[in-house]
Each structure stands twice: as C-alpha cells, then as structure tokens.
Image: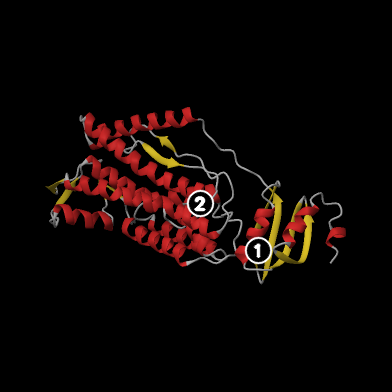
Amino acid sequence: MDIENGLSDFPFQELIDIVQGGFLIKSFTEKEKTIYLNVLPKYSHTKSFEIIMKGLEETEYIPYYHRKSSNYQLVITKKVWNKRELRQVVHIGLILVTFLTMTGSGYIFWAPGDLFLSILFALSLMIILGVHELGHAMMARKRGIRATLPFFIPVPPPFPFGTFGAVIFINSPIPDRKSLIEVGASGPLIGFIITLPIALVGLSLSEIALITEPKVGDILFSMPLILQILATLTLGEIPSDSIIIPHPLAMAGWAGIFVTSLNLLPMGQLDGGHIIRGLFPRHFRKVYFGVAGLLLVMGVFWPGYILWVVLAFLISKMKHPGPLNDVSELDSKRKLYAISCLLVLILCFMPAPIVPS
C-alpha cells in the first residue's frame, strides 16, 4: 500500500507516520480532513493507542479507536474543544442565589418559621449536591480531562427543594473506558457517602407520629431501602399506624438520595449512562432503551419517571460519544466501581418517590 501517494493531497501526512508507530494499517480512506483507518495493534490495544496519543499531543488532531464488526477502526480528526466556562463571579453568584432559594424552601416547607433550621437544610443539601459534582470534576482532572467547577441551578419556591441540582461540564474527550467509568461513578459514590451521616443525624432528630386523615395537598415521601435501614437504626421499628415527621436534615438527606438514584439510571448522559457505556461499548443502547421502557411503565406509579425519560432523550437522544479508546479491556477495579454503583442504585431507588394525597 502506497500510503504517501494515497494521501498526497492530505495536508497531515505526519499523522500516518504517527499511526504506524503503534498500528499496522490494513486500509484507509480520507474525507473532509478526517482519516478512517482499519488497523491492527502492534502491541496491546492500550500501548498502541498510548503511542499515537503521545505522538498527537502537539498537533491539532485526536484519535478515536473502536471496534467495528470484526475490525478495529482508528479515526483521526481535528480537535474540537468545548469552551463552556463560567467566570468565578458567576459561580459565586449562583451559589448565593441557590442558597437563598434553598433557605426559602426550607423556611416554607421543612422548617416553617425557623430560619436557623432552614439555613441548616440549605447548607446540608448544597454540600451533598456540591460534593457529588466535585467528585466528577476531581476525577476528571485526575485523568487529564478538562472539566468546569460545579455550578448550582436555583429554583425559587414553591419548588420544595430550592434547586434543580448542580452540574459540571466536561470540556474535552474522555480518553478510555476506565476513565469513563471512573468519572461516571465518582460523583454518585462520594455523594452517597456524604449523604449517609446527614440523613442519619436527620432521622435521629425526627419524630414519629400516628397516621391521621390526610388533607388535600398533603404529600407523602417514600422511603428508599437505605433510609429504611437508617430509620430502624435511629428510631427503632416504626409501627404500621405511624409515620416519620422528618427533621430538615432528614429531608436534605432524602433529596440527596433521590438525586443519586436518578443520576444512576443507566441512560444517555446520566452518570449511570456513562458507566453502562464504559461496561458495554457495543450493547449499551439496548440497556438504555430497556431501562427507558421500564421507567415509562413505572410512570403509572410516579409520572416523574416519564418526564425523566423524555428529558434524557431530548438531551442525548439515547446516544453517547464514548471515550477515545473504546477497545481496551477493563480491569477488576473499574468493574468494582460499576458493581458498587449498582448496589447504591438498589439502596436508593424508589418506585414512587412522591405520593400526593
């Protein structure tokens, strides 16, 4: 194969030389300054890919390596960096506004007339959500991935929690399946860990009351398995004719657990979607659509799941760009991360989180 003549009009001949450092080229095509190559690794998949990643560091190009049927395909294309950054003053402003909306929600719903407990509710929930997103950001930066700091999304009352959560933006490609699982799992795992002591203290300060005839507009919040366990540890066995009147800290814990369960659902760009994409690079769409179908059925019990599926579809269309190296095998450590997240999802998931009277 005369590669040099085949790409005589392509301005980046050195890219082919870099590829040949780690791969044997079986065939190639070039289209719109992107090279598509069928290759065989000269070494392990990981080592071969690392060779060309290092060779491309000082160029404007980036490789994507995946398996297509029985062949391995390498795509060399121009880097397109996202630049979704917020000025520091915007971060601080969003934190302050979200603190106010959370405090207002706490003052109205969870600690009526008690400013101190309302502030405690707001701080606790901000810590839970902020630590979750910081977990993503810190792991991303550890793996050389560009990520923004978390920023909060304030929502004023009558929304009962004062926020739609916090998010970060990933501004560069994720290098491999290991990193994809680590970034996806780090947020919910560390968020879950920080939620447990807050929920535990909140439940220990909660009260047990006899069930009365519900009033129109009353809302009941379901207890996920993890809160049932913590409630038994702190309050003992709850009589069947009684309910828990939650302390504001317990509601902050409930909200953190609810957010964790939603994020761990294996769909699209959710944390669970990242994990499944890393585990099953060739079959992840089957999982996405299977889970989406199940949640649509569960919408009979809580319509919010239907909305969540619609949002997940609108944001990602049940697609996932995947990592640059989509071929290298996972090790036991990353599989353990995924299993841990599955256990957390089981502990946090609620078929009908909110039940209006």
Q: Is mark 1 on a helix, strand or loop?
A: helix
Residue 232 visible in the snapshot: yes
Percent from the top left, x then y, of residue 294? Answer: 43, 61
**What residue type is disc 2 on?**
Gln
Which disc is residue 23 wearing? none
Q: Position of residue 203 (x, y in %)?
A: 20, 48
Residue assigned mark 2: 269
For label 2, the SS is loop
Snapshot quadrant of residue 92: top left
Q: How many marks?
A: 2
Examine the image and state in which quarter residue 115 appears.
top left
Task: Determine which quarter of the picture holds residue 47.
Answer: bottom right
Q: How far apart are marks 2 and 1 (CA)?
A: 28 Å
Image side of residue 222 versus residue 148, left or right: left
* Residue 20 percent location from the top left of the image: 74, 62
Observer-side mark, 2 or 1, equals: 1
> Is 101 above or below relative to 205?
above
Q: Where is residue 50 in the image (x, y as percent from the top left)?
A: 63, 59
User: Disc 2, disc 1: CB below 8 Å?
Assistant: no
**Label 1 amino acid?**
Ser
User: For the point 71% across and 55% down, which residue is it?
Assistant: 76
Residue labelled with disc 1: 48
* Residue 289 visible, this angle: no
